[in-house]
Image (cartoon, helix red, strand yellow):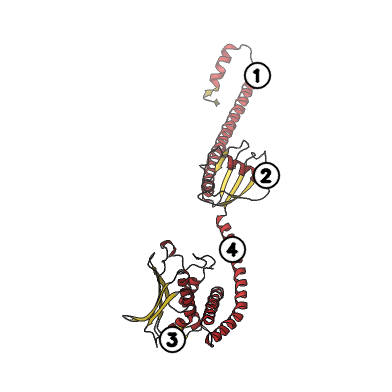
Amino acid sequence: MTMAGVTLSTLLHPLEAGVIGLDERSLTQAFASFTEAASSLEYAYMQLQAEVGRLRHELEDTNRDLAASLEENHRMRQHLNRILQGLPCGVLVTEAGGEVSLANPETRRLLGTSGESALPPWLRNLLDRAQSSRGELEYRCATVAAEWITVRCAQLSAEEGGSSIFILQDVSELKRLEREHEELSRRQALAEMATLLAHEIRNPLGSLELFAGLLAESDLEDEERDWVGQLQAGLRTLAATVNNVLHFHSQPSPGLAPTDLGLWLRSMHMFLQPLAQRATVRMELTQTLDGVLVAGDRHRLEQVLLNLALNAFRIMPGGGGLRIHGEVHSQPGKEQAVVEISDSGPGIAVENLEQIFHPGFTTCAGSPGLGLAVCQTIMQQHGGTITVHSQTGRGTTFKLEFPLWGAKP
């Protein structure tokens, strides 16, 4: 029998030599006990080795899972950080002591700060107010990036760290739209009221113009005839203002029909005479448009000339000259009628030239600034254009261009 490379005779030899009187049966029992203990120890050792192997494998698996978890956490942190950096709203986090622990790029852009831990006093005051507020707090920061922002605060509990999370959002565009909506509502209300008043005024005004015309045709003394002329001029000026309001705030499609431009210019020249006389302005008409037809609404086209003439009379209170000239311009493959209205007034300042057709723009006190805007609208309705050329001190010329009747666009 062999155990761990040792033979039975090798173990018994010293016993035989050194132990006198020990019988063979006792020796056998002792050896059997020793063998059993050695086997038990060997088995325990093998179990220990197996357990160590198992624990080593478990430790390797645990380390591998831990490494994977750390890697996943790192990726998740990077992903969340990219989301935070790209959020369209600002995120600002302060700790219990008040120092800033996080400020994404949108926060720095909105507030115009670099995100340093030491907050400027105005921002600290804003955050304190947001913390005490239960809802959104509007603030006009008027930085380069934003005029208006909203701030909302979420407070973490002491167990969660006690941090304060502030959400900042740019609402400048929303505030601008709200202001525009309010302004549009006011304008709409004013337009409705103005249109109502204009309609109410127009009917009795037409009657006054009719009776003034009858008086002008009656047998009157020179002084009385001059008074009637002044009355006609005032009524026609008032009629132009009323029509401007109606044309601007209520613009149904014009009733286009063949319109003789020569006849239109001659009738308007006569119509404008009382106004010119009251303004001591010399009027001159030169035209070669008799029989030239355009698709026009006669009444609206009259409003264009009336507005342009009234503007000229206003800027020449001491008298001057107004010239109306009309002719056909022929170009290869295109013919159009052109009417020019030129005054000898002071001209239009260069900085005002781009604004004169904008509704509400005026340099004359008391004028609503609708005349030229109405002129441009009416010309567009007729498929034509209105342009201006002016030099300070050398007068102003407005050019009206019309496509001829039947001409292809």
Residue 131 point in image, percent of width and height:
65, 44
Q: Are marks 3 and 1 in contact (CB under 8 Å)?
A: no
Name which residue type carries label 1: Ser
Task: Give the label, 3 or 2, closer to the camera.
Answer: 3
* Element assignment for label 4: helix
Instruction: Give me the C-alpha separation between circle 2 and circle 4.
Output: 34 Å
Relative to 348, say whether 380 is above or below: below
Labels 1 and 4: the sequence-earlier one: 1
Q: Earlier in the sequence, mark 2 or mark 1?
A: 1
Q: Position of residue 175 (x, y in %)?
A: 58, 57
User: Label 4, on which residue?
Assistant: 183
Quadrant including the C terminus? bottom left
Label 1: state its secondary structure: helix
Q: Secondary structure at mark 2?
A: helix
Residue 216: x and y in percent read 53, 85
Q: Residue 263: which disc?
A: 3
Q: Nearer the viewer, mark 2 or mark 4?
A: 4
Label 2 belongs to which residue?
Answer: 132
Tell me which amino acid carries mark 3: Leu
Q: Is residue 353 above or below residue 257?
A: above
Q: Which mark, residue 302?
A: none
Dot 3 falls on a residue whose secondary structure is: helix
Which badge, 2 or 4, is on the more N-terminal residue? Answer: 2
First in residue order: circle 3 vs circle 1: 1
The disc, 4 or 3, on the residue closer to the chain's N-terminal end is 4
- Determine whether 115 is above or below 136 in the image: above
Camera-nearest residue between 403 and 302: 302
How many residues crowd around disc 3 within 10 Å: few (fewer than 14), some, or many (20 or more)?
some
Q: Which numbered disc, 1 or 4, marks the residue closer to the eye?
A: 4
| Residue of label 1 | 26
